[in-house]
Amino acid sequence: MSAGLASGDRALSAEFLTEVLGDLVRTPSVNPGIFEEAMAERVQAWLEPTGAEVTTVEMAPGRPSVAAVLGNRDGATRLVLNGHMDTVPIDDAAGWDFDPFGAEISDGYLFGRGACDMKAGLATQIGVAHRLAAHADELDGALILHFAAGEECAEPGSLSLVQAGFTGDVGIVTEPTQLGVAVAERGLAYYRIRIKGRSIHASKAHLGLNPVRRLAPVLDALADYHDEITQRTHPLLPGGSCTPTVVQGGVKENAVADYCELLLDRRLLPGETVEGELDAMSARLKGIQRDDPEFQFEIEPFEHAFAPAEISVDSPFAGRVVEAVEQITGMRPEISGTPYASDVRTLVNDAAMEAVTFGPGNVAECHCANERVSLAEVEQAARVIDRVARSLLLP
């Protein structure tokens, strides 16, 4: 595989893109667990025939991201294509009708973990690189490709590439949008609330301090908080949310627990911050203490989070992508936002780039059994991105 350059129109063909995508899906890159080293090697092998300048940047030992540059970074325009190499784990292989790493094809879809999120997007980036390789000396600027580690856990793989200088003027994050063009995204932060207790034999529970019984007012306070934040609106995005997802605590059924932990999934709108919402939740929990002085808690965000991000709906670059979609598919997409979080936040917030989210696949078919992507959509996405790249980089 990846024996030579896919020149001309073959680079954007369903045949070539399927070959690339199948190889990537057959290379597990689960996070946490297997991680991205083998994927990085496959990506570099596919890029080698293009003659691109390829660099690896480790965000942590054994956690490489890959950057590739075609053309001249000192030219008129630098276009960044960004995607991540890691995938979520397989929760229950018995729920699959296909081998999760078999890259099997049925009814025009390729199945497998990461097929949609987002190795299909990576395949389009590789296809565009092969297509433009023959014109590398003609490019009035540069095509800069990101293949990032760690996105599924909000880790700084893309940030490490930006900090290493692989940035640009405009960008496309090739996450699944069903060929829609998104200029806004919700952010995502996880929080841990620890309700403190005092353990004792359950036959003498009244002499201890049971944190589980204090979970109810915490859930009530968070429900009120959720109702408040859902009233905040955005023209392109669903409202924010605060969802309790995990409860854990205790070691034995006949012992009062020392603590009880509650984990929260908090979706953020542009303008909201991880720190600001931490303060808002802390204030509500302190309100519980006024009625129950024995209630003691700690609340903290997880180490990594996705900040929300947006660019103007009137972005000229977004308009250019919309035009390309219409030219390739015959249908004009509306400007939209993504309900999920992605590394577009890094391009917009950290690199100050005009960046959109655009790629093949339906996000409803990600992170689930029988994950799949339409191969016809993969080809259309590659042709759209190629058209955008050519309009920007070829004089």
Image (cartoon, rainbow, N blue to C red):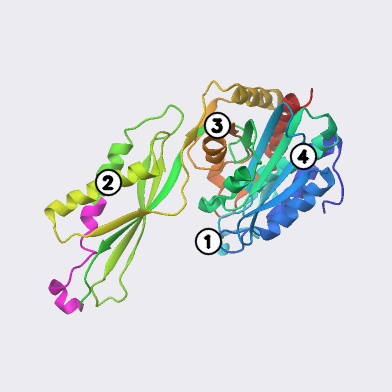
- Amino acid residing under circle 4: Ala
- Amino acid residing under circle 3: Ala
Viewer-side label of 1, 4: 4
Which of the two labelled residues, at mark 3 and mark 1, occupies the earlier sequence position? 1
Q: Secondary structure at mark 1?
A: loop
Q: Secondary structure at mark 2?
A: helix
* Quadrant of the rendering where the N terminus is positioned: bottom right
Where is residue 149? Give x, y as percent: 61, 52
Residue pictured at 57% horizontal, 23% vertical: 315
Evaluate if marks 2 and 4 touch, with contact meaning CB atoms under 8 Å apart. Answer: no
Q: Which residue is mark 4?
A: 129
Q: Which residue is mark 1?
A: 91
* Nearest to the observer: residue 113 or residue 87: 87
Q: Which residue is mark 2?
A: 223
Q: Which mark is residue 182?
A: 3
- Amino acid residing under circle 1: Asp
Against 391, residue 238 (above or below) is below
Evaluate if marks 2 and 3 touch, with contact meaning CB atoms under 8 Å apart. Answer: no
Rate crowding at label 4 as few (under 14), some (14 to 19) or many (20 or more) other CA atoms within 10 Å.
many
Viewer-side label of 1, 2: 2
- Amino acid residing under circle 2: Ala
**Mark-to-mark CA distance, 4 and 3:** 23 Å
**Mark-to-mark CA distance, 2 and 3:** 30 Å
Please indicate whether residue 154 sits to the left or right of residue 162 in the image: left
